[in-house]
Amino acid sequence: MFTHILKLEWKSFFRSANFTKGIAIKIFLAFFALYLMVCFAVLGASSYFIAAKAVPTVDPLLTVCKYIVIWFLGDLLFRFFAQKLPVLNSKALMVIPIKKKTIIHYLLLKSNVSAFNIIPLFFLIPFGVVLLTKGYAVTNVLFWLLSMVVLIQANNFINFIINKSNQCFYAIASLLAVGVFVQYFGFYDVVTPAGNLYFSLYKQPFFTLAPIGLLLLFYIINFKHFLQHFYLDDGVLAKKEKVVTSSEFSWLNRFGDVAPFLKNDIKLIWRNKRPRMTAVLSLVMLFYGLIFFTNPTYGEGSSIMYVFASIFITGMFLMNFGQFIPSWDSAYFNLLMSQNISMKQYLKSKRMLLLLSIGVLTLLSLPYFYFGWKVGVLLLIGGVYNAGVNVPALLYLCTFNKKRVDLAKSAMMNYEGMGMAQWLMIIPMMLIPMGIFSLISYLVSFNVAAGVLLCLGVIGLILQNYIFFKLESVFKKRKYAMVIGFQQK
Amino acid sequence: MIVSESISKIYNGNTVLEIEKFEIKKGQSIGLVGNNGAGKTTFFSLLLDLIQPTTGTIKNKGVVVSESDSWKSFTSSFIDESFLIGYLTAEEYFYFIGELREQNKADVDALVSQFSDFFHDEILGKKKYLRDLSKGNQKKVGIVAALIGNPEVVILDEPFANLDPTTQIRLKEIIKELTQNKAVTVLVSSHDLSHVTDVSDRIVVLEKGRIVKDLETNAATLTDLEMYFSKSMSLT
């Protein structure tokens, strides 16, 4: 029976729309996977030596074991966001004579063959080889490796259990946060007992039975759960419905004819998973500045990294959300195109949303003035440059968007809607201002370079009406391609 | 009201629509019928400027649809679920459309309240997003939204499909009321011959992109149409 399902899977993989399209993204993803593998392999091969150097008095394996608990918890958090529950076209399979149990076993076993479970091997195997060359007992090392692999697989199934509730996620996230906090500030040594636990798996090979027991336990819990909930109105197949409240946002009415769209865009962001995550990420990235502004070496010379950081911080929403305009509206694009609105109004509303986001992010980044006037001034200039130059530049590049975006999917590791435009955007938006700035500040001075960026932003703002007139005609021409592209799922 | 001249649409050498001259008078209600692939939705999409014609132009009240946006203020349509915004509640969606069509909340409320029997208490005040409604209820929302803002042209693609019998009958009344005063032009496509002859005073039969019949509706129309479609079945 498994072979039947396997054949179906094979066809669904090779015949899916995603497989035939988007070669560029496929190549990028392949490189990314390769990069991760190499990173993990290098880390695996070198962590023994790093550990030996960092804590020479302790067995390096014990040192590494201490950090495994953090790795596993982090792995679980990452899985929560990025790993999808195993689903195959179960609806069609429910009514044909295949045993339910077979389908569920298949789904669960399929989830074992996931990048999340395979990539850690690239760390573990080189690490194990190094251990063997260093004269660790062969049987013990092999059983320790087995334990680790089994624990990773257990993580796989734990994820499916906790994935059903956000509370579990917050519990694990806070556990990790508290653990790191307590450890970092030396209140309590969390990692040592955990490290000893993992180290005992090495010392006593038969302890491996414990992780295996755990794995089986979690497998059975999942199996039972799926078996009970394998109905259309239940479990993984059920559509989740929430009771919702209507909201008006009437304070946005002051924005005149673009107000209906602004209200709609705010609902779009608030009520859909992917745009919501994108917006939250923009706020989180405000803290990115701490990396740059606390490190004085970035402020030396031309302060080029400060320019990078200020454009990045104030334009995070612009870039993250803006890059998928108008794909966010792809599900109801036909409505917008046949309703009583002009292209200009539509574009203006998007521009207003982006400008508002830049305003808010610039205001929120003002505390960075604490790190000196240079930082503060550059942040303000970054905001103006984003508003004047990057907003129209981005909207122009957006006219190349013609891929559908599914609002309900997660934003993490999601390449849906990605096309050439998304890659091209980085050049004008980040590299050009950095280039101009470093050139002028090298040739003349910091003040002049900052002034030039400010002027560019202001000129962009002054010319916006003319730019919009041009943009409108470009959008009108590309509209038909968008209508077709957005229909393709 | 609507004039199309030598309009055609060709995809990769396949002609999906080719209509010499087609004119719809103000206040007429037109029923488009034809088997799958006859070109009904293509015609509507051309009329709404969602696709570009290979040749020819369509004028809506004198406005060439591909050149100006001004036809949008008096034209409304519901083609499929891509005309619904899934993350809004029904009320929010009606108000959104109302705002675009310069209707205040009271106007929208007044219009929507006329259709409370059409909704069967399953739509208003339900605190559900449109994406969570059933197909039939989604369709009802889309049809009612297309009536907001006193449009002069209303385009409905397959409005009877997915609706329960009570609602189908109610929808027929709604369409008849719309065209009563000969002020609103209604275009409806349907696979249900009896419904479409009930509501339309002119029936246009499309086949493989061409107009093959153009009839004023009378007592014999339904029999005519049934004859025609059973014949085309026996021919193929």
Image: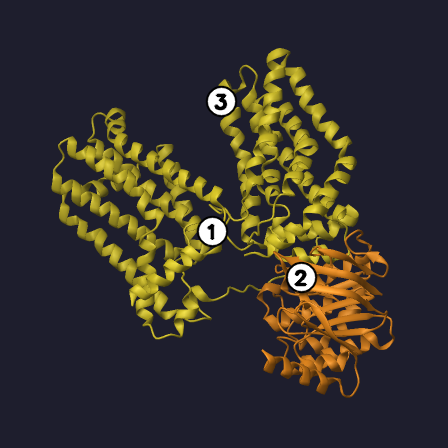
Chain colours: A yellow, B orange
Judged by depth in the image, the label closer to the viewer, 2 or 3, is 2
Secondary structure under badge 1? helix
Closer to the N terminus: mark 1 or mark 3?
1
Dot 1 and dot 3 residues touching (CB under 8 Å)? no
Q: Quadrant of the C terminus of chain B?
A: bottom right
Which residue is denoted by mark 1 in the rendering?
A20
Estimate the x, y position of residue A87 in percent, counting from the top left.
Answer: 41, 61
Judged by depth in the image, the label closer to the viewer, 2 or 1, is 1
Residues at discs 2 and 3 both on one chain: no
Tell which subunit mark 1 falls on: A
Structural distance between the alpha carbons of marks 2 and 3: 51 Å
Residue closest to the eye, A47 or A22: A22
Estimate the x, y position of residue A488 in percent, counting from the top left.
Answer: 56, 56
Secondary structure under badge 2? helix
Structural distance between the alpha carbons of marks 1 and 3: 46 Å
Q: Residue at x 47, y 51 (%)?
A: A20
Which residue is denoted by mark 2 in the rendering?
B83
